[in-house]
Image (cartoon, rainbow, N blue to C red):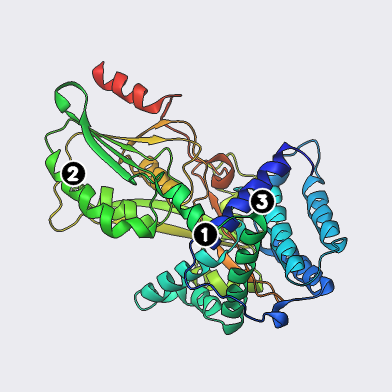
Amino acid sequence: MKNKKGRYVLLIVLCLLILSACQQQDKPNNQNFAAQQLTRDELLADYDAMWQNMYESYPFWGVLERSQPDNPDYYKSVIAQYRQQLQNSEQTGDLLMLEFLEIVANSLYETCGMVGHVSIVNSNYFRNDLALYTLYAEEMPELKPWLEVLNKSEVAEFYNYYDFLMELWLKQAGLTNQSSVDETSDELLPNVSMQRIGQNDKIAYIGVKSFADDFISSDIPQIQSFLQTVSDCDNLIIDIRENGGGNTAYWEQAFVSPIIKQPLQSHLIRMMHDTDLTQKFYGSSYADSKLTLEQVRNFADMTNLQLEDLAGLTLAREMVVNIEPEDNAEPFEGHIWLLIGPQVYSSAESFAVFCKQTDFATLVGQPTGGSNSGGAIFYELPNTHLLVQFDVEYCLNDDGSCNMEAGTKPDILADDALAAVLALIEN
């Protein structure tokens, strides 16, 4: 693990820790968290329980193993090495807890990387998710399993301690919260950029960096207003090449429902393991499914199925995404282009899949990063009550390939997607 990748992983983890510490308010000072200081054996038990649940419920081990064809035991060795690091730690008290957080975060990232939303949940995300899930609880009862975990008193107590640990870490690193915030505040850029481009300004361009919930209320009215002003344009370019996802409601309300003439529908097939953990979060979604794994294996057009991946998956369902035009929709009569690339992930990926299946837009650029899943579940470590998130649903592309592995292929392959579209339009 003493390699370039290991150092990069550590940098990622440290950035996440700083982000969490810098964005908290009213952090605890001089509080006694002695009860939260666990023994090494208790932490090892949490580490083992986490990976046991990952082995049982995480559906992408085949994807990971195919990325290391010459070393099939690579991931087991990584997990074992980080466990040994925890076993050999000479730290105690708060410093041991800090080291435990770093070991868990590093082991998850070095093993799974970006495959399936795998990470620890830091305190900033914990509180944001708690507020968000509480807000939508009434209109989306399917969020109940997530909210039950977030609302647990033991989890809240741990994340108060997490804040304390981050303060301690910042002091050790010689940093202050205010200086860290000041250094990054000037670098923030708008999430959306919109303009007319091309000859005679007849091309509408919209670039969106994130579909996160935080941007929905401010961005969507701006985008819808801009779309009304460019109805005379012959082409609309939507650029999501830097978009790592967020909420599917963003792209549905911003780009699709305001400008379509009639309903559009896409179909997805998802599968998962049948475990207590997967059932807790997604069991109701599969309860009435008529689709079986045997039927999936026999689909004639799914020539790229990875049968070894399906061996451990026992539940299957077909999802239908149906988007209706708004009552006051103003259809866009020109051609729509979607610019994509490797950074397109999660709900941005779902937009790419929707456009591909419905012909809503022509996809130009490089294959996407994938992960068109139902969203990560939370696993609560039994002793610390730290939350770990990971996807449990395995989504198929139309050809049977794993969306998390293959992503979505563009209709037109191009290194510079914007230049390629402009050239196509000009010619």
> Mark 1 belongs to which amino acid?
Asn
Q: Is residue 215 visible?
A: yes
Kindly give the residue lying farthest to the right in the view shown.
Answer: 88
Q: Position of residue 195 (x, y in %)?
A: 22, 35
Q: Earlier in the sequence, mark 3 or mark 2?
A: 3
Q: Which residue is mark 1?
A: 177
> Mark 3 belongs to which amino acid?
Tyr
Q: Earlier in the sequence, mark 1 or mark 3?
A: 3
State whether residue 406 is above or below residue 160: above
Residue 254 numbered mark, or none = none
Residue for point 47% across, 73% down: 130
Q: Which residue is mark 3?
A: 109
Q: Which residue is mark 2?
A: 227
Residue for point 56% across, 82% down: 152
Q: Earlier in the sequence, mark 2 or mark 1?
A: 1
State whether residue 311 is above or below residue 141: above
Q: Nearer the viewer, mark 1 or mark 3?
A: 1
| Contact check, label 1 and label 3, Cβ < 8 Å | no
Secondary structure at numbered mark 3: helix
State whether residue 74 is above or below residue 323: above
